[in-house]
Image (cartoon, grey):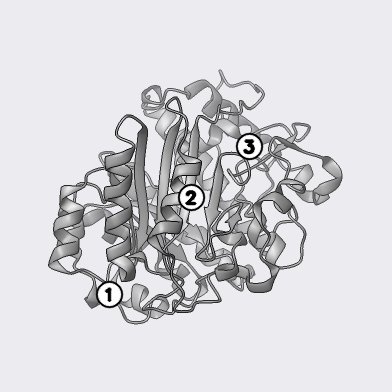
Amino acid sequence: MHQQVVPKDAEWVAPIQKENNIKIVSLILTRKCNLSCKYCYERNKSCQTSDFSSICQIIDSEINDKKEKYVIELFGGEPFLKFDLFEKIVKYVNNKFKEFNFIFTTSTNGTILSSKIKKFLWNNKNIDIGLSLDGCQYSHNIGRCNSFNKIDIPFWQQLPNCKSVKVTIFPNSISMLSNNFIYLHSIGFDVYGNLAYDGKWNSDLLKLYKIELNKMISFYLSNENIKISQMLDANTLSNICEPKAPQRHYCGSCLHMCCYDVNGKKYPCQTFIPLSIGDKALEYDDAKKLIYTDIIPNDKLDNECLQCVCKNVCPMCIGDNYSHGRGLYNRDMSRCSFEKERFRAMAFLASKIYEKNKLKNYENKKMILDGILLISKYLKECTKD
């Protein structure tokens, strides 16, 4: 059991909603991928691709304010299967919008690398790259089509704009969670992790998850030079709130984010497009009538979530909710105990950092302390020792 250390100077303050001064424009270059990962939410892959002229028109319509910060996401499928298009888009934006504040981001499985692609990525430092790498070879291969040896890990290690790797945790890999994170840290990566949305989560897996989280806590406390994964990062605790606090819109869909599929149509984000949910796809203008971009009315929420102190930090993918027929705001409750256990572990780790007088390094220390207190006060034990 995590024995919570409650700092004496903690008190509750209302969560602060950050100003949204970033506009995210996602472009799907192709629906094709060279892998068929077990947990992938893109269920309708095909050979369809976007064309350059249409993408240029989209970019011209979306990038129009020099005061904005733009994030242009180049996605697939596997985006490097259409590297010719990828390269053209980057050059087009770099040349036409020099006076604008923008970066590119992309996510890749890392298996498609020619010398030309490598050179291009090295020469374009304004492309932030997320590499999907699930950890050690065995764990990675069971979910990602035996692709570990197809990834040129030394290249990605050395590439300055590949800042982190993304780990998707699914039932078959949960017992190896801590080993996977420790391995990835040992080869120089920051690690971003999340539970797969379509996993069959149960009480036996929850017990394993708790054991693995405890191992990760021990690792981070013994290795203070390692950047703590977002899964346990204390900054999240600054948005823990009283049960009476309102539920706020969790993501940027229809707020400062949009996505264009290969058909040229506009959607709230990648999870609402035909590539992800087929005929259920919900276009941007239709979604905007349904999505609350600030406070979500109580009658739209599950009562258990409504009373939870974690509701404003608990991952809620409205696209996943929608695709599974739960409406927009009813979470997959099979994940609930797992997320609560993660927040308990997060608060425990933060309390230990506080004991070492290292929480002073966090800008939002006061709100983190409040979050630790609220979790100790309200969050019931998810599993028994």
Between tags 2 and 1, which lies in front?
2
Which residue has dot 2 on it?
58
Between residues 226 and 74, which one lies in front from this camera angle?
74
Indicate whether 352 appears above or below 302: above
Which of pointers 3 and 1 indicates the residue nearer the eye?
1
Image height check: is 366 above or below 147? Answer: above
Give the spatial CA distance, label 2 vs label 3: 48 Å
**Residue type, label 2:** Ile
Q: Residue at x 41, y 51 (%)?
A: 56
Q: Quadrant of residue 69?
A: top left
Q: Residue at x 28, y 65 (%)?
A: 83
Residue at 34 percent across and 78 percent down: it is: 141
In the displayed structure, does residue 3 sit left or right of residue 248?
A: left
In the rendered structure, the answer to whether residue 241 lies left or right of residue 168 reads right
User: What is the quadrant of the C terminus in the image?
Assistant: bottom right
Residue 288 visible in rendering:
yes
> Looking at the picture, how far across and down is residue 79, in whole percent?
36, 65
Q: Earlier in the sequence, mark 2 or mark 1?
A: 2
Q: Which mark is residue 376?
A: 3
Tell me the crowding category of disc 3: few under 14, some 14 to 19, or many 20 or more residues within 10 angstroms, Cα based. some
* Rendered position, 188 above or below 62: below
**Residue depth check, mark 2 versus mark 3: number of the one nearer the observer:** 2
Q: In the image, what residue occupies the spot 39% across and 68% down?
A: 176
Q: Secondary structure at mark 2?
A: helix
- Residue bearing the label numbered 1: 148
Observer-nearest residue: 86 or 21?
Answer: 86
